[in-house]
Image (cartoon, grey):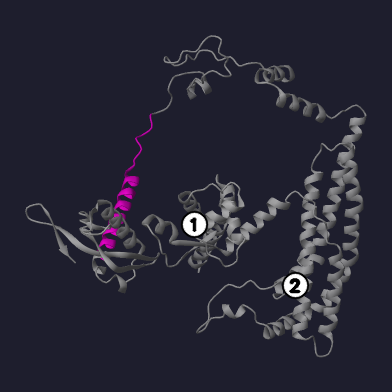
Amino acid sequence: MGASASGAGQDADEEARRRLDAYTYLSAPERLEHVAIMRVFYGTLLADLAVPDIMAKLRQSGGPAAGLDADTLTVRLEQLVIWGNLLRSSHTVKASSISEYQRSRSRYQLSKLGERVQRDADGVLAEADAAREVSNELLALVERGLRELAGLVTAPGGIQPQDGLERISTLFVQFGEFADSIRDFYAYLGQVLSRYDLDSAEYQGFKELLLDYVEAITEDVAFRAPRISATLDTLWPHIPALLDRLDAHAQGLTGLSAQGEGRLEVRVQRSRGRELADWEGLRGWFSDTDGQGSQVDQLRDATLRALQSLLANAKRMLRSATGEMSRRKDLLRLARWFEEAAPQDAHDIAVAAFGLYGARHLGIPPATDEVVPAYTSWWTGPVVEVPVALRERGSRAQRGRASAVEDHSAQKERLREAARQRAAARAAAADELRSASGRFAEVRLTSAALGLLLELLATALGNAKLKRRTGTAGFDLDSASSEDAELGIRLTVRRTAGTRTVLYSADGDLLLDDLELDIGRVSTAVDGEAEVTAS
């Protein structure tokens, strides 16, 4: 049991790391480009886009990603796939060149996790510093909705299932909006009151905000919280039966999570109010159910802390009026002088304001190949490397034993193993191509086999010789072939008018017009010359 619990814990940690990787693009050096790309996908529903489509939308919207070329955009998209923000989907591709096929064969769509992260990121970027009003009127609607629901549930015959669904959904939407607005407003209030540099005008404004607006909020919550708590106590014994009755009436997506023939095993996030845990959270907001205090108690404590912060600012302003003046305005004036001053004037201002003079570096000669004039300032002159021993102990003497030579055998073995795996994968791809020669329409190639075939095809077309057709303006291929002696594979390309060769693969389908492909085996003869054996 201990081993199974440890394995479950490791799986949970791995799942948490995978989900947190979806936030990586918001802190990457190219985060502005990544955000612009994600906004293109976020503005569509159930749409998979190829690189040309994304480039067109980026150029139409402008911004930091408008100038990305196809190769750079592909790199950005693949990185978003690795982080879990996008998903890759394959489809049939018709392209005029191999490079166009490689760019267009993969289409991308937004993952559920990526959609959630981008939605939250846009909300933070748009309204992070704004003061959000508290939807106080929703608390009265929550109280009225609970009272009406309790009356219908406790009445003979109970409530109709559809009416119960509508009332519970409305109730939890109203409560969720009210709770979110409370959290956002008090977070903003704490950010403001943590400042100790408020001047008299700012202090007056925030004092009126706290004493009027916050007082109205706390009074309304304190008035309605006992009534809501009493209604929930009346309703609480009937909640399990009510939820079972609602599930029997409207199962929703929970049918997908059931196991059985023809069913899918899917994790479903229920609507708010359809689980007993939602009702426990609602009850815990107004009543102390676990001994840790209710959210109403925390709201009262937060208001008290806000009043204490306001009093601390009032005491600071009173001390300033008795002669203990704040240096805020002086420091702002000094900062403005620094911003407007030339470099040499800024040095003089720093010396006058803080008594900081130039450092003197003695005893370290510069490099022999550097000629530094005597009038060069140490501020702009070249940096001299000071040994650590001299900088920390004032001595050049070496201390301690010399470190042992680092053993890189493990790293070398890992590199050799990686090289062997790559060689084995290419050999397997070559065997797959030789076995599929002449019957490409009957098999579906793997990604590795298609990649090797495209590599050989590009080399063959690059080595091809063109000859003019007799009596026409067209050209025919002559000696279009390529080979890899190490893998023992040879590709021959012939031009045949009217021929259509289709290559099916896991990455998509490749259509070759007027071309026939023949793959053979390359073996070494006794005299050392290579000979070709058809497979």
In this rendering, position of residue 466 left or right of residue 296:
left
Q: Position of residue 493 (x, y in %)?
A: 24, 61
Contact? badges 1 and 2 (CB < 8 Å): no
Q: Is residue 294 visible?
A: no
Amino acid type indicated by mark 1: Val
Q: Which mark is drawn over residue 2?
A: none
Answer whether residue 436 is magenta in the image: no
Q: Residue at x 69, y 16 (%)?
A: 348
* Of the two numbered discs 1 and 2 in the rendering, the one whose residue sits closer to the viewer: 1
Residue under label 2: 279
Q: Quadrant of residue 397?
A: top left
Answer whether residue 403 is magenta in the image: yes
Q: Residue at x 41, y 56 (%)?
A: 100
Q: Which residues are magenta?
A: 402-431
The chief SS type of the magenta part is helix
User: Farthest front residue?
Assistant: 471
Q: Mark 1, residues whose alpha carbon is within 10 Å: few (<14), some, or many (≥20)?
A: some
